Image (cartoon, helix red, strand yellow):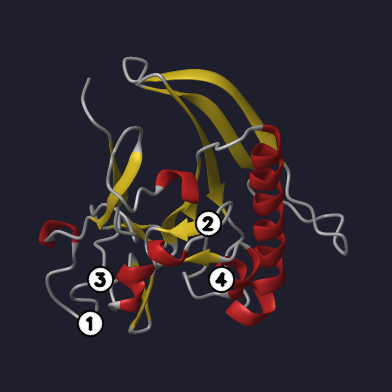
Amino acid sequence: DPVHFKLLSSKSFVLKMSNDNDFKTRDQLLVTGELLGERIHFIVNHWPSRRGGEFKSRPKRIQAALLCKSIVDSIQISEKNTKVIIMGDFNDDPTSPSIKDVLKAKSNPEFIGKDQLFNAMGNHFKNGIGTLAYRGQWNLFDQFIMTSTLLDIEKKYDDFTFHKSVIFNKSFLKNQKGNFKGYPYRTFVGSNFLGGYSDHFPVYIFLVKKSI
């Protein structure tokens, strides 16, 4: 929305696997701009799927996390007190190795140190709330992860500050009956059109600051 966001630059980063020259997946997109006059960076992700099983496909997402972390590190080196929001479908949960061990994203804002990352969706997952379900298990692949510069423990709100995250899982977005009751109401199952919305629930965050 150009009324609220002024695009300054964008750059895509290709994810490569050293042991697979034919590997292809979605790029990671870095978008830099001014949100109501405040400079902020967004890294948009859709990490490799779990096709073939979570464990077997895990190295691909570990590599995606390493690439993402390198992008964040390079921004933090070049810009002091920069604000970065990593967002998208990670095909991993907040407790997965790619998120927890590589990005080192934590869910408690009080334990986030300088230049560390905060996972705004971690507490939802801890409380058993997900954005998609598979074989009776809920996952939370759709996440917002951000630099500590977007946290304001003292709640002064002098600049853009993370306020809260939301999983939009209203009843009209869910299957109302059958074996998949309560699951997201999908648009397609295979080639069959169901007329639903998505196999994932939407997520969003609130960023707030004092009005001028």
Task: For label 1, count other residues whose C-alpha is less than 10 Å away and answer few (under 14), some (14-19) or many (20+).
Answer: few
Q: Where is residue 119 in the image (x, y as percent from the top left)?
A: 44, 60
Q: Which mark is residue 183?
A: 3
The residue mark sitting in front, 3 or 2, is: 2
Q: Which residue matches tag 1? A: 179
Q: Residue 23 carries which label?
A: none
Q: Find numbered disc 3 in the image and state the secondary structure of the residue it sits on.
A: loop
Distance in Å between CA atoms under marks 3 and 2: 30 Å
The reply to whether the C-beta atoms of the residues labelled 1 and 2 are less than 8 Å apart is no
Task: Say what amino acid the circle numbered 2 marks.
Answer: Leu
Q: Residue 117 carries which label?
A: 2
Task: Say what amino acid the circle numbered 1 marks.
Answer: Asn
Q: Residue 100 carries which label?
A: 4
Q: Report which quarter residue 4 is drawn in.
A: top left
Task: Say what amino acid the circle numbered 4 marks.
Answer: Lys
Distance in Å between CA atoms under marks 3 and 4: 26 Å
The front one of 193 and 94 is: 94
